[in-house]
Image: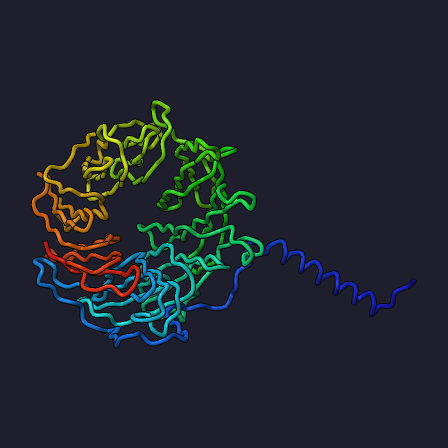
Amino acid sequence: MKLTRRQINTLLVLGGVTVLLFIGVFFLPWVGCSLQPDYPNGGGGGEVEAPVIPHDRFRAPRTSNIAHLNWELNIGGSGNEEVIAAFKPGDNIIIFGNTTSTDYDFYGEIAGYFVAVLNSNGTPLAYRTSEGTLERVHMVTAVDGVEDGFILAINTQTESLVKKVSLAGAENYPARVCVRSTLNPAIRPFERIVDIVIDDSNSNTAFHAIVEVMSEQNQNHKRLRVALIDRNLNITHNEFFTTRTGYSLEYLRAFAVGNTFRLFANARELTASGRSFLAHYEWQVGGGVNDNHRVISAPTNILFETIDIVPNSPIGGYVALIRTQTGHASLLNIRNNFTTSISQLGNNFMTNASLFSGGQNLYSFKRQSGGAGSLFRSNKIDAHASSPISGFGDFHSVNTVLRAGATNRTIVVGTNNDTLFISDIREQGVVAQRSFEARGVSIVQTQYLEGNGILLVGNSTSSGGAVGANFGGQDVWIAMVSI
């Protein structure tokens, strides 16, 4: 049968549409998220009932007759709140977190992640919520001529997003980019963003979004993907990281300096033994992956799990806090050439451990079973010369460690049951310590302010002592103390 010219043109058009549809399906794993603008500072507006009692969302913080506690405030509703990060870029305090509440401080908002703005005296100025679960927040400065702002990593039921929130308003800036690549994400979210890594030394470099990729057959079997995102929030490259057959990657930390991106993960065997090693990946942006499948072992080939890892500046390399197969806490010194050496932090069995970097020193906390903990200090140049700090309180956990001011001074915040401790540590040991009754408090972030003021931001599950109120299950608690 001979086709007419019109029929031929129609077939050509249909063929072109088919090719375009095929291309669209082929690239669907990378563009499967909605594309409409989304400005998180737009508020919620959900229909909710009024609080049972009259409530002033913009109330002044509570003053306290407890010595050295200047003021404190809880933020929340009848649900649960969790603080993710807090910043004080100028006169105001900016708090990011997640909430399931739609009443009290979040009346008229929707459950999701929130941004709360307080003035320097602790009085709330604004609350905003948006859909999703906030995983990580980074502050950035003067990006492409836009005012200071924040980069957010968010997971929703159907999307994994990187968002830009500008303090001056996000209307003139691309607000979001989707980094999830799973087909049919609404059916089963096999991917979720777990971190954003930014080179703090160079604000013009790209962001690295770390995405956890779970196997559809076994969600305990994970690999990692890094999406390189430019300052206009466009994904410019994707790089997958895998490890040995039969092992799953559990993300630990990543670092970006210039064009070099380094990722560390626990490579855990998918067997009953669950043994793990530390896996390292180095990616030269624009140059591909180097040393893929590199597994870092301790000198004696012991089996271990890495709890945390920090850069060992100024000499280079990294120091990792590890738990050995016998349960002991040890420091693993990883040099620039990736040779390693190990030192054990005492002989006690470890039930709680953490690693912090403050000034020129490393601080590692270890608690033995059924007892108080010990805080060890190491000079970064010789990470294995660790010694316990004298005068350290009976901490059961350490929440934060930070360097205070220009002097060699470190502020350590920790808890022991319902008591909150704040220790001022110098070279000679603990020179001052404050303690408050603070039931159910866990401090997430500490910031030193001039004049010996210390801003504490964390979570609280009850009221009593230094905590003046509680609205629901878990609230966000903010306090200003002096030491």
Q: Position of residue 260 (x, y in %)?
A: 39, 43
Residue drawn at (23%, 66%) of the image: 92
Q: Where is residue 450 in the image (x, y as percent from the top left)?
A: 13, 57
Could you tell me if residue 263 is visible in this image?
Answer: yes
Vertical side of 42 occupied by 406: above or below: above
Residue drawn at (49%, 53%) of the image: 236
In-image side of 2 versus 311 (left or right): right
For the image, the number of numbered tags is 0
Quadrant of residue 428 in the image? top left
Name of the residue lying farthest toward the right: 1
Residue drawn at (9%, 57%) of the image: 68
In-image side of 43 versus 237 (left or right): left
Quadrant of residue 32 in the image? bottom right
Q: Position of residue 107 (x, y in %)?
A: 33, 73
Could you tell me if residue 145 is visible in this image?
Answer: no
Quadrant of residue 46 in the image? bottom left
Image quarter hosting the N terminus: bottom right
Vertical side of 442 occupied by 337: above or below: above
Q: Where is residue 29 in the image (x, y as percent from the top left)?
A: 57, 54
In-image side of 93 versus 409 (left or right): right
Residue drawn at (56%, 44%) of the image: 217
Between 457 and 288, the residue placed more toward the observer is: 457
Colour mode?
rainbow
